[in-house]
Amino acid sequence: AASEGSAPGPRRGRFRHPNLKGITLMQPLADAMLMGYKKVEGRYHALKLPKRGGGIWLALHVGKNLDYFTNYQVMDKVRKLWPGAPTTPSNRRRHGCIVGLVHVRDCVASHVCRWMMA
């Protein structure tokens, strides 16, 4: 317990870093990216990368929405990249949290992204 007049400690489960940015993906896309099956993510806004190259590390956050498991178009794309992908949300504790870090080396326009067009 904090003593009277002292600042409260960090909340359990909260991580703060002034320079770390994140990206949110829905399951099973987040696990596919974390395991290396999904290597491209299309976004409609450009990501600012360092001018010196080398890319940037992003926290991979898993959204709470489970709709992708019932979206046949998305699941067909996932299964092409990852034949063993889960077909149901088996681990609900891995939703709404950061599950790892991903390294982004380049940013392309979403209309060029093969993942979205495949």
Image: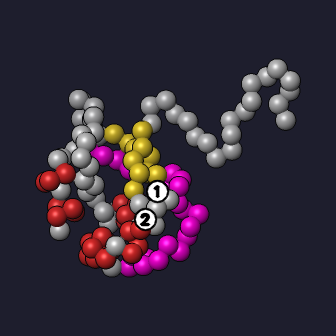
Which residue is depicted at the point 42% across and 79% down? 87
Query: Pointer 2: what residue?
Result: 27
* Residue 83 pos. (x, y %): 33, 79
In magenta segment, residue 53: no
**On screen, 6 above or below 17?**
above
Locate residue 68: give its quadrant. bottom left
Q: Residues within 10 Å of mark 1 (few under 14, many from 20)?
A: some
* Residue 7 pos. (x, y %): 74, 24
Query: Pointer 1: what residue?
Result: 63
* Residue 46 pos. (x, y %): 24, 40
- 2 and 1 marks in contact (CB < 8 Å): yes
Q: Amino acid at mark 2?
A: Gln
In magenta segment, residue 96: yes
Which residue is depicted at the point 61% across and 42% down? 14
The stretch in magenta equals: 84-106
Q: Is residue 84 visible?
A: yes
Q: Is residue 35 visible?
A: no
**On screen, 21 above or below 81?**
above
Secondary structure beneath disc 1? loop
Quadrant assignment for the C terminus: bottom left
**On screen, 7 above or below 32?**
above
Q: Amino acid at mark 1?
A: Gly
Going from N to C along the chain, the mark reached first, 2 or 1, is 2
Quadrant assignment for the N terminus: top right
Q: Residues within 10 Å of mark 2 (few under 14, many from 20)?
A: many
| Left or right: residue 40 compared with residue 117 | right
**On screen, 69 above or below 34?**
below
Secondary structure beneath disc 2? loop
| Left or right: residue 97 compared with residue 10 | left
- The span from disc 2 to disc 1 (Cα, nearest Å) is 7 Å
Which residue is depicted at the point 38% across and 42% down? 57
Residue 112, labelled with which disc? none
